[in-house]
Amino acid sequence: MKKVILALLIVAMISVSCFSLMACNSGVAVGFQNATTGKDYVESFSNLTAKGYSSAGLAVQDMINGRIKYVVTDKAVAKELVKAYSDKVKLIDINLTKEKYAFAVKNGNDELLAKVNEFLANNSDEVQAIIEGYTNGTITPKKFTNGDKNAPNTLIVATNAEFDPFEYMDGGAFSGIDMEIMAMFCEEYGYTMYVENMAFEAVVTSIQTDKADIAAAALTVTIARAEQVSFSDAYFLDDGEDASQVIIAPIADTTFDNCKTKEDVEAIIKNL
């Protein structure tokens, strides 16, 4: 009798565990890059199974391989990924958020913050030309390599070089919108630029802990981050249409094909 009761208990426990597991993972799986606003967006829908990755590119690869259904990421990044996998994925070209990107320094570093804001104000045309050149594919990207980290007047720049077109690796060199803007800034103010490449979720922490001087990583300005670091004036705005979260879908998926607005998309998401 004891053995029968024990067996029944084990079966019941397994059933409960399996039910709980299915309940936790019953929603459509949607990927995003860790610590981004894409994560916040996906997790705002309780019916979805949220899955984080170290880069949006890895999420897209998992989607192509059938492990997740969709990817949510920044629009400019999504465009580059869709170009790279044009025969496998497509962009749902509807803006789901309104954002602005800025550089960030440690709270209290007013001198550096003032320099960055002065630079952005005085070089707004040049900065926008860089942004448009990358997003339109009309620029020849520059490459930047690190020298001596301990050189005099070195500015340590924290980034996550897996976010094309803002920052990415080209061989052993850094390229991208943020890298070019930072290089211009360093040249104007007499700094030697040294780029520290790290996981995106470590970027803000590196500024707080003095492991880097400035964050240049397509950082969306949020209330939570503004409590941790000081943001510069925005250099990339939702007015430009690309500072938004969007969906990347498998090319054969027709789920969102008839959507015209954010509300259309979200009505479908809530019923996935």
Image (tube, helix red, strand yellow):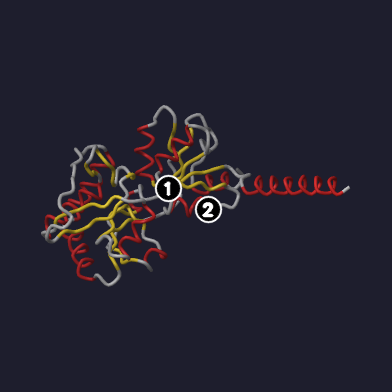
Q: Residue at x 29, y 67 (%)?
A: 106
> What's the mark number on residue 248?
none
Mark 1 → mark 2, Cα distance in angstroms: 12 Å
Q: Quadrant of residue 15?
A: top right
Q: Quadrant of residue 246?
A: top left
- Left or right relative to 135: residue 60: right
Q: Which residue is mark 2?
A: 43
Residue 40 % position (x, y): 48, 55
Residue kind at label 2, given as amino acid type: Glu
Residue 194 % position (x, y): 20, 53
Residue 218 % position (x, y): 32, 52
Q: Where 149 falls versus 272 (above or below)?
A: below
Q: Residue at x 46, y 45 (%)?
A: 72
Residue 64 % position (x, y): 47, 32
> What's the mark number on residue 33?
1
Secondary structure of the residue carrying numbered label 2:
helix
Secondary structure of the residue carrying numbered label 1:
strand
Q: Is 38 in front, or is 172? A: 172
Q: Residue at x 59, y 52 (%)?
A: 46
Q: Residues within 10 Å of mark 1 (few under 14, many from 20)?
A: many
Residue kind at label 1, given as amino acid type: Gln
- The residue most toward the right is 1
Q: Is 41 in front, or is 172? A: 172
Q: Nearer the viewer, mark 1 or mark 2?
A: 1
- Left or right relative to 271: residue 214: left
Q: Where 181 falls versus 255 (above or below)?
A: below
